[in-house]
Image (spheres, helix red, strand yellow):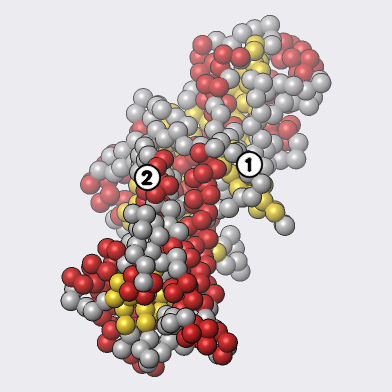
Amino acid sequence: MAKRALVSVSDKTGLIDFVQKLVDAGIEIISTGGTKKAIENAGIPVMSISEITDFPEILDGRVKTLHPAVHGGLLAVRDKKEHMDAIKDLGIQPIDFVVVNLYPFKETISKLDVAYDDAVENIDIGGPSMLRSAAKNHRSVTVVCDPADYDRVAESLDENAEVPFALKQKLAAKVFRHTAAYDALIADYFTKQVGEEFPEKLTLTYEKKQALRYGENPHQMAAFYSEPIKNESTIAAAKQLHGKELSYNNIRDADAALGIVKEFKQPAAVAVKHMNPCGIGIGETINEAYDKAYEADPVSIFGGIVALNREVDAALAEKLHSIFLEIIIAPSYSEKAIAILEHKKKNLRLLQVKFTDDNQEFAQYTSVRGGMLVQDLDTKGYADIEENLKVVTDRRPTEAELESLKFAWTIVKHVKSNAIALVNNGLMVGMGGGQTNRVGAAKIALEEAGEKTKGAVLSSDAYFPMSDTVEEAAKAGITAIIQPGGSIRDQESIDMANKYNIAMVFTGMRHFKH
């Protein structure tokens, strides 16, 4: 009895060559719909699924393979006599190969303004059923869901006249990953349609983008996975124009830099080290913004990552080329800029990211031992608190101070808590982050800024538990402060600010970052 392969695919990449190799190996082909037509048009003999089921395809093709003649042929355990006798008595012939990939649900929902009914219609039912049946019975059935596996299956048939169990097992494992990912996308789509924010079951799926040489440290293995439906304004969708492969730490730092620079509409430049900003500048031009970011901390920027929200021209490229950087991120580069940055900088990564004004809400997933925390990404900014900004001191901030406070508040949410950021004349001049007490973070920021504290403003990601931070700021020359407020000892900080004629405003919003 000849072996049989059931072939039904939406992605027809490499299909005809593979089917021809199956036929050359003496395998009969059964197929459906458009796949059958493609095989017939290639001049390859093929049977209709209706010849196997003795039942027509119905309901616009919704029902064609959901039949005992198909699943009996897939699920019968070959070394169980009762199974084989049962299908023989029913006139069912075993199916030994399943080559199936699924309706393009992901591609359908990726389209802008996709109609709900179109999304529903592209949910495959028969395909996953065949894949799961075949994968369950993988000792007897070779199941292929990915065109990338066609060659190695064909090579096995050519060399051994059969597919070894080890390969069948790997292919079955891939099938269950494939169908799980497919179902996860469908579940996510419907969950969003009905407005469930935190459902009782969380099903996530990601696609492997690249293997990494190692993780945070050389003894840690790692890989980079991306969301299946790409958002162009992300590091996962960035186009690398030059340089060596990104590392685990590169990706984390680049993501942090991109998140900061996207906060600004005006020309902005951000320098990042270890996921913290070490220099941020805004200006009338991107060159002015970069000069300010560099001036903020010309030491820490060395070996860091620079993100810019405007095109890199030749003049800016010359400045960037003059120091050692790991990565540059920008929406575009002029041809001259690329030539300058590539010159003698073989390892410098140049990333191009589309700075689209997307309103997509991102969720943040943080693994903990035994579980995962999920929250909305902190996308709130100055615009969300501006109307409710409360001046709590005798002196109101000047217009110039308010502009600096706006900038400082935008920055501080990107610094690890406890966080303090200092701003003077359109640039971040000092930053203290990741400290176990707030006054300690302030002292680090003030010391880093040095003389640049004179006339600067200070922002804090959370309230002051006591007045010591205000006093340290006042002694260093800070003129205005922005902080959430909400401490039971707020009045002490207010009194201290009044003592030194500092203007202080409360936002009513906290920006912890752990």
Q: Residue at x 28, y 49 (%)?
A: 338
Q: Which percent across, then down, holds residue 431?
A: 60, 35
Q: Quadrant of the C terminus?
A: top right
Quarter residue 364 falls in: top right
Q: Which percent across, then down, holds residue 89?
A: 48, 85
Q: Amino acid at mark 1?
A: Phe
Q: Amino acid at mark 2?
A: Asp
Judge left or right: residue 132 versus residue 337: right
Q: Secondary structure at mark 1?
A: loop
The relative height of residue 378 versus residue 384 in the rendered view (above or below) is below
Q: Which percent across, then down, holds residue 302?
A: 48, 48
> How far apart are the two marked residues, 1 and 2, measured between alpha carbons?
26 Å
Residue 198 numbered tag: 1
* Observer-nearest of 188 and 387: 188
The residue indicated by pointer 2 is 118
Q: Residue at x 57, y 67 (%)?
A: 221
The relative height of residue 66 versus residue 299 in the rendered view (above or below) is below
The relative height of residue 118 versus residue 161 in the rendered view (above or below) is above
Judge left or right: residue 449 versus residue 497: left
Quarter residue 94 falls in: bottom left
The relative height of residue 445 versus residue 98 in the rendered view (above or below) is above
Q: Is residue 210 visible?
A: no
Q: Residue at x 34, y 28 (%)?
A: 285
* Observer-nearest of 422 and 93: 93
The residue sitting at the top extreme is 394
